[in-house]
Amino acid sequence: MDVKIIETKTPKELPDDSKLGFGRLFSDHMFNMDYNPEQDWHNARIESYAPIIMDPATMVLHYGQTIFEGLKAYRTSNEKIQLFRPDENMARFNRSARLMCIPQIDEAFVLHALKKLVSIDKEWVPRAPETSLYVRPTIIAMDHYLGVRPSNTYRLFIILSPVGAYYPEGFNPVTIWVTDKYVRTVRGGLGEAKTAANYAASLYGAEVAKKAGYTQVLWLDAIEQRYIEEVGTMNILFVINGELVTPPLGGNILAGITRDSVLTLARDWNIPAAERPITIDEVMAAHKDGSLQEIFGSGTAAVISPVSHLAWQDQVLTVGDGGVGPMAQRFYEAITDIQYGRAEDPFGWIVPVDEA
Ligand SMILES: *Cc1c(COP(=O)(O)O)cnc(C)c1O
């Protein structure tokens, strides 16, 4: 299958690199592809960024059968555009698809189309330090039908959004609120899938946390409400007694590519790293005896997000001195240096976007 290209006749004005923010602006083009059982995935095309006109009975609007991915394109100092581990995003897209009863995609083809799209809109990859072009592949259920079952037809689209530096004034630690009242996912549920339902389930708890003065929620397991799972859109890591500890991928949490990159680097640097269940009680006890050194989140948007404060029941704990720990700093620098081509890529994580 080929990607048909219909260039836009109404290019937009490029935004100012210093005013980007996150997820508010979109580039000139988008990729679209449709699915039906007779034709499989077909009609792959890059065309003007435009609204998707939908029948009000379109299934995605009612039953949330949808999945997405998130990755970034980076501009190097010598004007190359590159992606970070995009093959992992494609593989996860298909894992999410399986859980959501969405037909599998040809990972190599969608990655090819994604690169083509980024290449066509390469002027939208910003140049200011630590900025990038966020790439959002999505699949939505398109049947017009009121009744709960998997759809027969789908739309896959990819849109691009230039994004600003996450930490324009340097690393800014976040505060997190641990809840035993609200839950995000449960064993046997959708926690592993990047699907709308998980974010819908997180909204109410996140609002309660915000009202209490915290940036994000840390979710515990839904059954015992003891085991730590993850934060909003980030995985979570702890440094206890020099060891990096993060919850295992047991089905409830998203298999973050940044999380995997951190673990890979830790092993490469001979830092002990364990993927094992960790309870909130263990974290509180480690803080009490002085062995809790750092807490940080990992995800594509922020890369590494140091946690300064953690609130659990009636206690508020300050992590270390409330600043940025040395491990968080080291992982952040190592990963962003690879992403922006400032350092060698010993793990083969970088995929160049060839000129179209
Ligand atoms: C996307 C996401 C992550 C982070 O994954 P990365 O691949 O590192 O960006 C973690 N948790 C949730 C719930 C997510 O949606």
Image: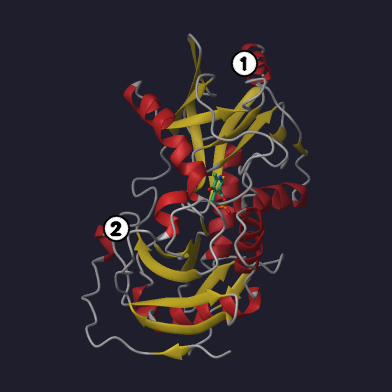
Residue position marked by numbered label 2 in the rendering: 24
For the residue carrying disc 2, how many other residues have a C-alpha within 10 Å: few (<14), some (14-19), or many (20+)?
few
Q: Residue at x 70, y 52 (%)?
A: 265
Query: In this orientation, does residue 233 appear?
Result: no
Residue 344 is tagged as none
Which is nearer the eye, 64 or 18?
A: 64
Which is nearer the eye, 252 or 81?
A: 252
Element type at mark 2: loop
> Where in the figure is residue 309, as x and y percent of width and height?
47, 24
Residue position marked by numbered label 1 in the rendering: 284
Residue 184 occupies which quadrant of the picture?
top right
Q: Residue at x 50, y 25 (%)?
A: 182
Count the marks. Answer: 2
Which is nearer the eye, 149 or 191?
A: 149
On the rendered image, what quadrant is the N terminus found in?
Answer: bottom right
Question: Outermost residue, top direction?
Answer: 314
